Image (cartoon, coloured by chain):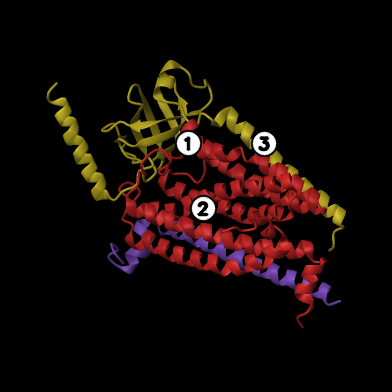
Amino acid sequence: MKLKARHKRFILIGIGLALIALAATLILNAFRSNMVFFYTPTQVEKGEVPKDTGFRIGGLVVPGSLKRDDDGLTVHFVITDTSKTVQVIYKGILPDLFKEGKGVVAQGKVDASGLFVASEVLAKHDENYMPPEAAEALKRARENSTSTLVVPK
Amino acid sequence: MHINWFKYSSPQTFYPLAGKMIPWFYGLAVLFALAGLYVSFALAPTDFQQGEAYRIIFVHVPAAWMSMFIYIVMAGWAAFGLALNARLSAMMAQALAPTGAMFTFLALVTGSLWGKPMWGTWWVWDARLTSELILLFLYLGFIALQSAIDDPRRSDRAGAVLALVGVVNVPIIYFSVKWWNTLHQGSTISMTAAPKMVTIMLLGMLFMALAFWMYSIAVALVRVRCIILERERSTEWVKNLFGEEK
Amino acid sequence: MMHWGSWSAFFSMGGYAFYVWFSFGITAVSLFIEVIALRNRRSEAIRLSRLLAQN
């Protein structure tokens, strides 16, 4: 089938305009809601989070706070931004990088008792890359330096 | 040494020059790719938190760099063509767009393949991922607009306007992880801080980036030669070029 | 293979074989397709130019 040049042009202009419109829609949508990808526990505490609808919270998993129920799927943990904390309950599979002390972003709702019921849990990792031995050495160095800082006090 | 750049700004003189440069850039691309793959898989150690999955960085980050860099270069050529009414500049912009779109696509796909095992999701609508997707639409919009208008002058002008409007998206992509909170992590390599990565991993990434860069130059030159022939088919110099050989 | 114990360890990529090899694979395939597509476009452009020049 051979399209007339004029028709082909109209179709291509249509596709071009549709793509630009799609890009613009995405930009506007991103500016409206997704600029705040997640809220911090402090914002949750202050009530700066959307009411009635779901939202995401982000922070670090408090070390020692991760507990598993007997069903093996339901997990409890605490998210902190180092000043405030939020209790989270989640039923499902955790991502491989989910670890205590590491970053996490959870999507869900706050229930009546103030518990955050997550429907999705994502791991947020940092931008550092190094072999395990280097990470271990760094950790040891940090522990030594903090202990010397703390002791004189 | 004085080089008459204007001499090379005509398609007629640039055509054979580009032809001579292409094998060199292809060769460099292959060399850097071999070195990059060797470092990425044989020399670079396991990562302390992501294990072997982090090796996706060796294609993901160079592809993402190229997607943004090519867009800036493309917009630069387009602006140059618009300002000086230079035919070859507009052709260069046109020649870069498909390669830029391909690297944007690769950055998105490899990012998705990295996000699934590490973050736990193929895709999220955070500022970094959304703005990179917009970049893909800008490339595709540019290509569609250019091919929609038959008159080369008008199509170059329309494409240039779109390319220049879209350029604001590039700093948005780059700084998105700083300006807003995102699931995507911050920059490992930045102009203001030491790289947050051991040297051998960094070397692998730089080799791969150089390979993609050389590859991009090579294919853009091949494509610009096609565009030159397609547009100037009925000019005397093209006829002379192909008329004598039997 | 420097720190890989065996070839099978290398190919399994610590359990992330699918993600790692798919990423590198799709990159290689994309570059290859672009090169081939350009080769075809070039021979078509030359064919038409020659046709026009010799008539």
Q: Disc number at residue B63?
A: 2
Q: Disc number at residue A57?
A: none
Residue A119 appears in the rendering: yes
Q: Which chain is purple?
A: C
Asked if badges 1 and 3 are on one and the same chain, I answer: no
Rendering quarter of residue A33: top right
Q: What's the amino acid at mark 1?
A: Val
Q: Which residue is denoted by mark 3 in the rendering?
A: A24
Asked if badges 2 and 1 are on one and the same chain, I answer: yes
Rendering quarter of residue A102: top left
User: Is label 1 in a helix, a strand or a loop?
Assistant: helix
Color of chain A here? yellow
Position above or below: B6 against B170: below
Position above or below: A37 against C22: above
Q: Disc number at residue B177?
A: 1
User: Is label 2 in a helix, a strand or a loop?
Assistant: helix
Q: Residue furthest front?
A: B1
Q: Which chain is red?
A: B
From mark 1 to mark 3, how far is it between C-alphas?
20 Å
Which chain does tag 1 point to? B
Task: Work out whether mark 2 precedes mark 1 in sequence or the reverse, and give the earlier one.
Answer: 2
Which residue shows up at 41% across the image and 59% down it? Answer: C17
